[in-house]
Amino acid sequence: MHQLNFLNKEQAEKIAESFETPVYVYSEEKLEEAANNFLAFPSAFWHSVRYAMKANANKNILKLFHKKWILLDCSSEYEAYRAISAGFEPEKLQISGQETPRNLSDLLEKWVKMVATSLQQIEAIWKIAPWTEIWVRINPWMWSWAFKAISTGGETSAFGIWHEYIPQIQELSAKYDLKITKIHIHIGSENTPESWTDSANIGLLFVSQFQDVTTLDLGGGFKKAIMPYEKSADLQAIWESVAATFKQFAEDTDRKIHLEVEPGKYMVINSCSVVAKVDDIVNTWTDGYKFIRTNTGMTEMPRVPMYGVQQPIVVLNNSSETEEYVMVGHCCESGDILTSKLYSQEEIEPIILPKVSEWDIVIIEWTGAYNASMSMKNYNSFPEAGELLLRNSWEILEIRKRQNLEDIWKNEIEVI
Ligand SMILES: Cc1ncc(COP(=O)(O)O)c(C=O)c1O
C-alpha cells in the first residue's frame, strides 16, 4: 500500500472539508526542490534549464520558476502569451510547437524565439524577421526507447524536421543568409539513460553541420519514478555522460557548445496530490469485482486512461481490514479507470486498500505533470477542479478557483 507524499492526514482532511473536491494540491517546497535539483547540476560549458510549461502552466508555478531564472519552452503561441502574462520576459521564451503561430510577427517582434519545426517554418520566420537567429528542431532516427506512446523521435513521429532534410536546411541557410544558432532535439518522455548519451552524440553530429550553432537543446524526458517498480532518471549519471560528449566535441572541433534541457515532468510531477472522495462502492457479484467509484477520474487525471499509467493511491480511514478493489472515475466512460493494467487501459487491475466506506478521502499522488494542464475538463459537464498551494507545510492557498456551473456553458451562443 502507498504512503502519503507531502500532505499529512490532518491537512488532507482539512482540505476536503474546506474546499470542494476533487482538488489539486501542490507543494511549494517540492516545486522548489525539483527546480534546485536541476539548477545544481554541473555541465561541460554551462547549461540552462527551460521548463516545458505544457507539463503544468499554472501562473504560480511559472512565477516560482521565473524567480529562479529558469527559461520556458512553450508548445504554442497561447502558452507564450500565458507566460508573458505571468511575468516572463518574452526573450526568455521559445516556442517549439507543431502549429505555426497566427501571431508570428507579434511574437518575433517581442523577441520570443521560435524553434522552426518544419522547412516551411524556417521560411516563414525569415520572411517576417530576416534579422533573427534561427533555431531548428531536428528529428533524429532514434526515439526514447522507454515507452513508444510518449516518444517524439524517429520516422513514426511528425515532430521536427526529419534529419535527412539537413541539406535542405543548409540550402535555405545559404539562400537567405540565415544564422542558425541552435539545434533542438527532443526524442520523447521518460528517456533511458543510454538514450541521453546517444541523443547528445547525435545532436552534436547535427551541430557539426552548422558552423554558427552555439547551443544544443536536448529537450526533456527526465523520468521520475512514481510507482515502486519504476526508477528515476539518474541526473548525475546523465549529466556526466552528456558533459563528456560535449567536452569531447570541444576537443575535436574547438567549439564549446552550450547545453540546454527542457524538463517538464521531472519539475512538477512530485509536487501534486489530487484530493478526492469515495462516492460509492458497487460490485459485480461474488465472482466479480469490487469497485470504488470516486468523484474524480479522467477529468482531473487524463494521463491515466490516455496512456494506461498507474498512480499511487491512498485512502484515508482507520480500517484495519483490507480488500481488493478496482477504482474508477466519475465519468460515464468505460475507460475512466484509475487502476488499469500498466499501459493497457482496457484491462482492470485491482489493488489492495483498507476497507473503504462512502465519503472516505482518496488521495491520488504524484499528479503534478500533464494532468491539470491536459485536463479533459467539462466532460460530462463536471466543472474544472480548483488548485491549491501548500506553503511552509501549514498555509493552504487557493491558486485556481473551481469552475462555476455557468462557466461550463458561458461561451455558448444560443441560436435556437
Ligand atoms: C519540445 C519538448 N520539450 C520538453 C518536453 C518535456 O518532456 P518531459 O515532460 O518528459 O520532461 C516536451 C514534452 O513532450 C516537449 O515536447
Image (cartoon, rainbow, N blue to C red):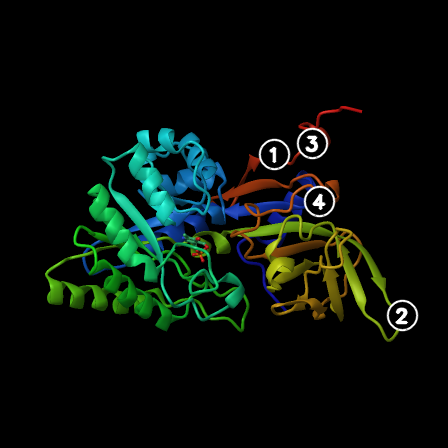
Q: Residue at x 48, y 49 (%)?
A: 55
Mark 1 or mark 2, which is nearer the start of the sequence? 2
Type of residue at label 1?
A: Lys
Question: Which residue is the site of mark 1?
Answer: 401
Mark 4 or mark 1, which is nearer the start of the sequence? 4
Q: Secondary structure at mark 2?
A: loop
100 vs 228: above or below: above
Of tags 2 and 4, the one toward the viewer is 4
Q: Are marks 2 and 3 in contact (CB under 8 Å)?
A: no
Quarter of the rendering occupied by the C terminus: top right
Question: Which residue is the site of mark 3?
Answer: 404
Mark 4 or mark 2, which is nearer the start of the sequence? 2
Quarter of the rendering occupied by the N terminus: bottom right
Q: Are marks 2 and 1 in contact (CB under 8 Å)?
A: no
Write down the quadrant of residue 162 in the picture: bottom left
Disc 3 CB within 8 Å of nearest ligand 1 atom: no
Residue 232 location, x and y as percent?
44, 67
Local crowd size for mark 1, using a 10 Å CA cut-off: few (<14), some (14–19), many (≥20): some
Gap between marks 3 and 1 measured at Cα: 9 Å
187 vs 415: above or below: below
Local crowd size for mark 4, using a 10 Å CA cut-off: few (<14), some (14–19), many (≥20): some
Mark 4 or mark 3, which is nearer the start of the sequence? 4
Type of residue at label 2?
A: Trp
Q: Is residue 403 left or right of residue 151?
A: right
Type of residue at label 3?
A: Asn
Disc 1 CB within 8 Å of nearest ligand 1 atom: no
Question: Which residue is the site of mark 4?
Answer: 379
Of tags 3 and 4, the one toward the viewer is 4
Gap between marks 2 and 3 measured at Cα: 38 Å
